[in-house]
Image (spheres, rainbow, N blue to C red):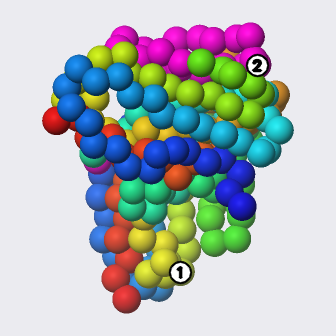
């Protein structure tokens, strides 16, 4: 079984809808991250969490919110989706040292 | 804005040739990491080099780091078609990673 899973894997939605992307991990890591990737570009950090009670904004948090429900679960919400949020979204985890990050398979989100 | 910038943005080589990708960054770092991404999939960690290291090897991968020039290179020797992917450098600072834009490598059989 994959160590970091994301649901859904693909989602098409309409402008103005609220969307939640979910991430679960079985690695036992404290740190979790949400990234966005636009076509042909690198990853940009949206939010990160170093433990269950810790939530921090990344580079591009506007229009997004997160919830860390448990050590193993970190969800990303788009409160009112807009077309320029169409992108590939990745969840990642790392241990307390924060060196190597382990990525989920990604969620492809299309906002029409 | 992205801390790391890869060069070239795209690289096409024949199987068996070596592939070299470069990464430049702007601020001081704790370590620099290289990741690989197959089309549309999650990133996979390849190798990490600490700021006090100058060179590191892992299998067919060789990474160098020049902190005075704020640059790193990734060399893949004896490339294979299966090495076709995008490669990203990521600089680590204050326990956070900042990714560059990536190099798209195509290895032709």
How many labels, in total? Answer: 2
Residue A38 drawn at (x, y percent):
30, 39
Quadrant occupied by the N terminus of chain A = bottom right
**Considering depth in this image, is A48 or B70 the residue closer to the camera?**
A48
B22 left or right of A27 in image = left
Residue B18 visible, this angle: yes
- In the picture of the structure, the residue carrying the numbered disc 2 is A51
Residue A54 drawn at (x, y percent):
70, 11
SS type, badge 1:
loop
Q: Are marks 2 and 1 on the same chain?
A: no
Q: Residue at x 55, y 45 (%)?
A: A6
Badge 2: chain ID? A
Residue A10 belongs to magenta span: no
**Considering depth in this image, is B55 or A51 the residue closer to the camera?**
A51
Where are the magenta residues, as a range?
Answer: A40-66
Separation (CA) of disc 2 from disc 1: 42 Å
A95 left or right of B38 in image = right
Residue A30 found in image quarter = top right
Residue B101 found in image quarter = top left
The residue mark sitting in front, 2 or 1, is 2
**Considering depth in this image, is A78 or A104 the residue closer to the camera?**
A78
Task: Tell me if mark 2 has few (under 14), some (14-19) or many (20+) residues whose alpha carbon lies within 10 angstroms of its own.
Answer: some
Q: Residue at x 63, y 72 (%)?
A: B60
Query: Compared to B90, does B84 lie above or below?
Result: below
Numbered tag placed on residue B78 in the rendering = 1
SS type, badge 2:
loop
């Amino acid at each position: 079984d994959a160590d970091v899973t994301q649901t859904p894997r693909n989602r098409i939605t309409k402008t103005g809808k609220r969307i939640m992307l979910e991430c679960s991990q079985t690695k036992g890591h404290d740190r979790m991250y949400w990234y966005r990737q636009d076509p042909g570009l690198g990853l940009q950090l949206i939010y990160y969490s170093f433990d269950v009670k810790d939530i921090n904004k990344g580079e591009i948090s506007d229009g997004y919110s997160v919830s860390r429900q448990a050590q193993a679960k970190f969800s990303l919400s788009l409160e009112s989706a807009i077309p320029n949020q169409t992108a590939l979204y990745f969840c990642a985890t790392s241990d307390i040292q924060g060196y190597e990050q382990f990525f989920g398979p990604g969620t492809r989100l299309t906002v029409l | 804005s992205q801390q790391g910038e890869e060069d070239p943005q795209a690289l096409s080589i024949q199987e068996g040739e070596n592939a070299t990708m470069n990464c430049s960054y702007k601020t001081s770092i704790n370590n620099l990491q290289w990741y690989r991404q197959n089309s549309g999939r999650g990133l996979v960690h390849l190798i990490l080099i600490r700021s006090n290291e100058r060179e590191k090897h892992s299998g067919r991968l060789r990474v160098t780091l020049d902190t005075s020039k704020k640059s790193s290179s990734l060399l893949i020797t004896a490339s294979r078609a299966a090495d076709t992917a995008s490669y990203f450098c990521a600089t680590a600072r204050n326990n956070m990673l900042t990714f560059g834009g990536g190099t798209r490598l195509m290895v032709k059989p």
